[in-house]
Every structure is written in structure tokens, then in C-alpha cells.
Image (cartoon, grey):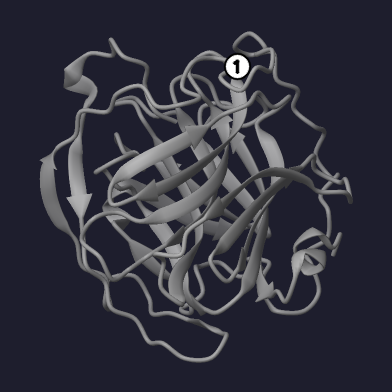
Amino acid sequence: MEPNQGVPRWLAGLASAFLIAGPFGAFGCHGTVAGSGDTSADGPVGDPGTEPGDAPGGDGDDAPAPGDGETPAPGDDSPAPEGGDVDEFDGSQLDAAWSVLRPELVDIAVGDGELSITPNQYSVWFNDEAGSLIHKNVTGNFKATTLVRARRASNPSEPVGPWYQFGGLLALDPTTRLHNYVFIVVGDRGEYLAVETKSTRDSDSDVQGPAWPSGDAELRLCRLGSQFLLYKRAVGERAWTEAVRYARPDLPNTLQVGPLAYAYTSRPDLRASFAWVSIAPAADEGDCTAPD
């Protein structure tokens, strides 16, 4: 998601620091329509540098050449999980249960049974910079799951191309001005396709980005107390592969959770399409790895 050292500084955008209040309570998802309660404030200009895993194949995996990712044929979607709070995007607009952070950074559309998020300008979640997020307030232990396709907006039959453009799931602490969150996303890392994971603590990001064979994936972000377990699988598969787990005892009981897309480029060409998003309670690791 982040650039390697040597990327021109003119690519850097404005950081976003923000303070957002939301209702707290027992496990559940609460939200308001975009603009009804989200606030943001501009911060200093970001200057991202190299993070662990930024180099191609940073975890030791071989990275495929750009454009080598396979694009699965349409119609092979997994069904949405049963139980919990599931949005299959059957309508023509985003449900009012969702809120949108920094909506000016993306174009959002709902239709044909999917949510599409298309970045319209430079944006990034890294260190002291923040992008857009569609979210609900979620309290307690949970598992958030989605099926997302990161494709070129100019040619949706092709996986997204360079540079550093992703779609996936993020869980954000809304109570602090410094950025604190975890995420899992799929997309392009500049020289190869990847499923990238990140834990950002007080605007300091730790990143892993092993190669992935396409721009499509099913992703899961599971919280068990202070532990966050992140999973990935190919579209249509049942078994989950653990991507990483993070210990984040600093994060509060209620987080803002949901889908995101961003493009670390002034010329974005990404449409992240979400077939569904599910947020359900989780009691243990068995719930986190359940096929659903």
C-alpha cells in the first residue's frame, strides 16, 4: 500500500486527522448517513517511507509480474454468511445504517447487487494519512467478512494495476486524533498483486504484503478482546488462511468497522466491488475460522 523510498514527494497528499463520536453499547452495528455526524480536519503533509514488507515479496514470497494476476470468471461468488448483520447491497443506494468518513475522496455506488467504491483522487491509509471508510460502530468481539474485487475502473475485466491501490476491510479507533486501526486489503503494491495487512498505532504503521494470485479475495477481520486475527481465501473457497494476528490492547471496545478503497496515486484507476459485507459476533477462534 505504501511507496518505497524514492517516490517523488509531489505524490504525497494531505494527512487527515479526525475525531469522530458514535453511539456505544452492547454488540451491534450503529451508523448514520454520510455527513450526519462524521468530521475531519486536515493535518500536516505526509511523507511516507519504507515500512516492513514494502519491498516486492517482502515476506519472502515470489511476486508475480504486474498484470500476471488471474481474474476469476463472473458468477463464482460465495454466498453471504448467514446470521449477524449482512448487507448484500440489493438496493440502489447505500443503506442509512452506514456512515462515510471523508466521502469526497471516493465515488460510491450501489447497484446490481454490489457496492462499488471508486477513488477519485490520491488517498492512502498509512502513518499519519487517512483515506475514506464506510463504517458502522461495532462493540465487543466480532468478525467482519467480505468478498471484494479490486479491478481497473477503466477495464473491470482486469485486476487493478499500479500503483498501491486496494480495497478491503478496516477497524478504526474513532476516539483519538492520531490514527489507530487494523486492516486487510487486496490490490496492487506497485510491482505485484497482494493481500496486504496493516496495524497502525499512534500514526505509525506496520505493514505486510505477500503476493496474491489475483485482485479478488474473500477477507475476514476478527476481534477477540485485544487480539485481531486477519484471514484471506480465494473466492469460492471454504477454508481460511490466517494472514496475520495483531495484539492491540490499546484499541477501545467500540470501533468503526467496514469496507474501504484507496489509491496512492494522483491518477487512480481502481473500482473495488463488494458483493456483500457481514459483521457478526465472535466468541473464539473457531468462530473466526468458521467457513460460514
Residue drawn 18% across the image and 19% down it: 9
Q: Is residue 281 left or right of residue 173?
A: right
Task: Return the x and y of residue 8 as percentages of the image width and height.
Answer: 22, 13
In terms of image quadrants, where is residue 215?
Answer: top right
Toward the bottom, the furthest residue is: 25
Q: In this view, does 157 lie to the left or right of 192?
A: right
Task: Return the x and y of residue 52 as percentages of the image width and height.
Answer: 46, 26
Classify the position of the N terminus by image quarter.
top left
Residue drawn 12% across the image and 48% down it: 43
Q: Is residue 39 left or right of residue 74?
A: left
Q: Is residue 85 above or below residue 79?
A: below
Residue 98 visible from this viewpoint: no
At mark 1, the secondary structure is loop
Q: Name the residue under label 1.
A: 57
Task: Return the x and y of residue 259 as percentages of the image width and height.
Answer: 52, 56
Task: Return the x and y of residue 22 as percentages of the image width and height.
Answer: 34, 81
Q: Which of 213 and 74 is in front in this view?
A: 213
Q: Is residue 82 above or below residue 118?
A: below
Amino acid under disc 1: Gly
Residue 139 visible from this viewpoint: yes
Classify the position of the C terminus by image quarter.
bottom right
Q: In this view, does 270 lie above or below 278?
A: above
Q: How crowded is mark 1: few (under 14 residues within 10 Å), some or many (20 or more)?
A: many
